[in-house]
Each structure stands twice: as C-alpha cells, then as structure tokens.
C-alpha cells in the first residue's frame, strides 16, 4: 500500500479524505476504449443501481463528466420538454442553483421557497400543485449541504407518485451515506457525484434514472456534452464507453471506493458511522457553546452548521488555520445572514477523530477567550 501523505483530514463534504487504497487505484493509466476499462464503468453502473435498490430492470445508471452540478444540469436540461414545467422546492443554495440552471436554459419552472432551516411542507406543496396544474416535474435537494438539513423526500415522492409527476432528486451529499430506495420513493432521476458519501475523488457525477422517462426525453437536451440520453445510449451500445474522454483515474478510484463501501458493510453501516460521528460532534460542540443551526429532528448525518458561542471573537480564517495546523480542515458557512461555519463528517472520519476535533475546539476557545 502507498504511504499516506495527508497531513490533515478534511471536514468538508467533498472533496473529502479518501483511503490510501482509493488513491492507489489512480496509479495506473487506462485507455478509454479498452475493454478492461469499460468493464469498470459497467460494474460501477451495476453497483450504483443496487445501492439505489433499482436493479429491477426499470432503471439504469448514467455517468457524466464534471462535478456534481454538471449532473444536476444534465438532468434538468435533458429531461424536460418544451412543454414541461418544473416545480423546484427551494430551501438552500443547491436548490437555488437548480433555478439558475433552468433560467440559463430557458426551461419553464415554478418555485416554492422555504426558510433555509425549514423542511418543505408536503401539504403546502400539494396545495401549490392544485393551483398549478401545468406542473409536470418536481425537483428538490435531499441533503441540503448549505445547512446540513435532511429534506423529506418520502413525503414529496408520495405526492409526485399520486399525481403522476416526474420526480428529480439531488442526493449529492446523501447517496451512499443514507439508504434511499429509489423506486419505492417514486424517484425518476437521482443525482450524486464521485466525491461525496461513496468517498471517491472529484471528477464525475452519476444519475440513477427511470429508463422509460429517460428514453422519452430523447431529443430534449439543450446541450451537446450534457445530453443525458445520448450518454446513456453510448454507454449501453458500446458496453460502458463514455461519449467523450472520461476521467479514467477518477473512475478507477471510484470503483475502488465502491468496493470499500461494500467492505464497510454497505450503506447501513456507513450511515451508522456517519450518524454516530455527527451526533458526537454536535454534542461535543454544543457543550463548548457552539449551537447547531438546524434542530435535531431535521438534522442530517453529513454536515452541521454551527453558530459561534456568545461573546466569541469571531475570526474564521484564524480558527481555520489553527485547526489545519493541528490536523483538520473546516468549512466556511454558506448563509448570508448569520456568523456561522460548517463541519462535515463524511470521508475517512471516525469517532476518534471527533474526540480530537472537539478537544481542538476546546483548546481554541480557551486560547481566544484568554
Ligand atoms: C456538492 C453538492 C452539489 C454539487 O456541487 P459541485 O461543486 O458541482 O460538485 C450539488 N448539490 C448538493 C446538495 C451538494 O452537496
């Protein structure tokens, strides 16, 4: 095994700290038209379908070059026809980004906005749909990485199913770390990327897609390179071939990361690790006076937003530097109206890390408060 050259661990929700063996998978240069390489792509597609509980023949997986946003943009600009109207449920920066994508490509949409620390209310969504019968697609984020909140995709999926609407979910920072039964929840397109809960390195995104809905979207794409249907067609016809140059090293690393997810015990075991680290982190930080922004029942297991303790002399960069020198890199906040910061706990983070992190914050608070 190669040596671990990391001098600090990332408490950022992607890129995150990966294992030496995931990094080691990138030491081989692979050829994009070689069968060995395309077989890796095919195995990734099959494994992702299984993780989504979608290996029933009705679903397929499409991999797409670029970061997570490229995957979301690919779905939102390839699936809706000129007549479709997308309803976006907004309660964070990532659902806001969906609106930007739809605006750029002139896809028709409506939005229903909620506070950033509030879960979209299903009754309100149903009422809005009653008033807007032109809506054909619902799009939302599962784990809002902006705040750390976990949205209720079960309740919204039920509404989508009842009304026969397509349902698009950005599960970027939850897929692989939270069990999601894609067919059961009525999800037609779920998007995530290589560098989140599966714990690979950045470079591509993936979509688990309802085959029928994907096939019906043929000809709707507004972009050549992000054409989801065209990418699907090539991967199917050519046995795992991507249309344009694929990130070969990233793909190999991701394949290794999937094997390691399996070894850890699958999504349920990983979820348990994330959940216990997140709980210990929130409890430890709260004891030091750092209050979480999201209330316990809505908090997801991936990332937590914290307020600073009362009277604390806030200097994010200084705090960041101090923690980095001691082995951990933290994440700035993404809310405009409050002094906050975020701690992610996905990647190679274990309970012993949490103990160390909380002790470091304690030492830092004592240092700052004299
Ligand atoms: C990470 C993330 C994305 C994608 O961001 P990229 O920077 O494009 O990888 C999208 N949605 C959510 C909820 C995310 O956490």
Image (spheres, rainbow, N blue to C red):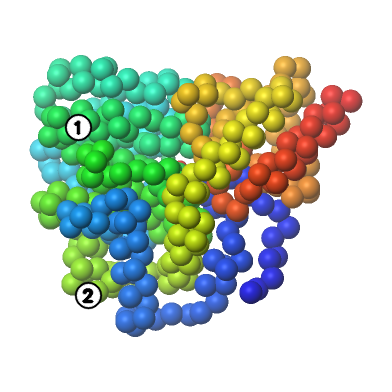
Label 1 element class: helix
The location of residue 181, given as percent across then percent down, is: 30, 44
Nearer to us in this view, 165 or 320: 165
What residue is shown with label 2?
A: 238
Residue 210's label in the rendered image is none
Question: Horizontally, is 302 left or right of 319 in the view?
Answer: left
Question: Horizontally, is 236 left or right of 246 in the view?
Answer: left
Question: Quadrant location of the C terminus?
Answer: top right
Badge 2 vs badge 1, beta-carbon distance below 8 Å: no
**Residue in the picture at 46% in, 64% down:** 259
Name the residue at the right extreme. 370
Nearer to us in this view, 188 or 267: 267
The location of residue 93, given as percent across then percent down, is: 44, 33
What residue is shown with label 1?
A: 160
- In terms of image quadrants, where is residue 24? bottom right
- In terms of image quadrants, where is residue 319? top right
Q: Residues within 10 Å of mark 2 (few under 14, many from 20)?
A: some
First in sequence: mark 2 vs mark 1: 1
């Amino acid at each position: 095994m190669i040596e671990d050259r990391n001098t600090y661990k990332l408490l950022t929700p992607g890129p995150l700290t990966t294992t030496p063996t995931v990094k080691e998978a990138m030491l081989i240069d692979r050829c994009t038209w070689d069968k060995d390489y395309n077989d890796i792509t095919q195995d990734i597609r099959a494994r992702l379908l299984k993780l989504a509980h979608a290996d029933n023949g009705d679903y397929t997986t499409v991999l797409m070059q670029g970061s997570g946003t490229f995957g979301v943009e690919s779905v939102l600009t390839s699936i809706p026809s000129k007549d479709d109207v997308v309803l976006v449920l907004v309660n964070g920066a990532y659902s806001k980004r969906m609106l930007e994508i739809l605006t750029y490509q002139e896809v028709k949409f409506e939005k229903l906005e909620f506070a950033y620390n509030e879960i979209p209310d299903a009754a309100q969504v149903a009422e809005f749909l009653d008033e807007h019968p032109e809506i054909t697609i619902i799009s939302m984020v599962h784990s809002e990485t902006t705040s750390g909140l976990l949205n209720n995709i079960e309740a919204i999926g039920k509404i989508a199913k009842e009304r026969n609407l397509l349902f698009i979910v950005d599960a970027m920072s939850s897929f692989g770390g939270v069990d999601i039964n894609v067919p059961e929840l009525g999800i037609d397109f779920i998007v995530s990327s290589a560098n989140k809960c599966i714990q690979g390195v950045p470079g591509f995104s993936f979509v688990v897609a309802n085959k029928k809905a994907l096939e019906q979207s043929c000809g709707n794409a507004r972009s050549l390179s992000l054409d989801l249907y065209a990418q699907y067609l090539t991967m199917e016809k050519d046995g795992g071939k991507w249309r344009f140059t694929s990130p070969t090293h990233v793909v190999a690393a991701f394949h290794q990361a999937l094997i390691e997810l399996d070894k850890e015990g699958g999504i349920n075991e990983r979820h348990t690790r994330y959940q216990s680290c997140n709980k210990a982190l929130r409890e430890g930080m709260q004891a030091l006076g750092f209050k979480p922004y999201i209330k316990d029942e809505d908090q997801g297991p991936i990332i937590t937003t914290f307020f600073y303790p009362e009277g604390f002399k806030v200097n994010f960069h200084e705090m960041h530097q101090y923690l980095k020198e001691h082995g951990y890199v933290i994440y700035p906040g993404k809310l405009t109206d409050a002094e906050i910061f975020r701690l992610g706990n996905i990647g190679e983070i274990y309970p012993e890390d949490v103990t160390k992190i909380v002790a470091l914050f304690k030492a830092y608070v004592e240092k700052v408060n004299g």
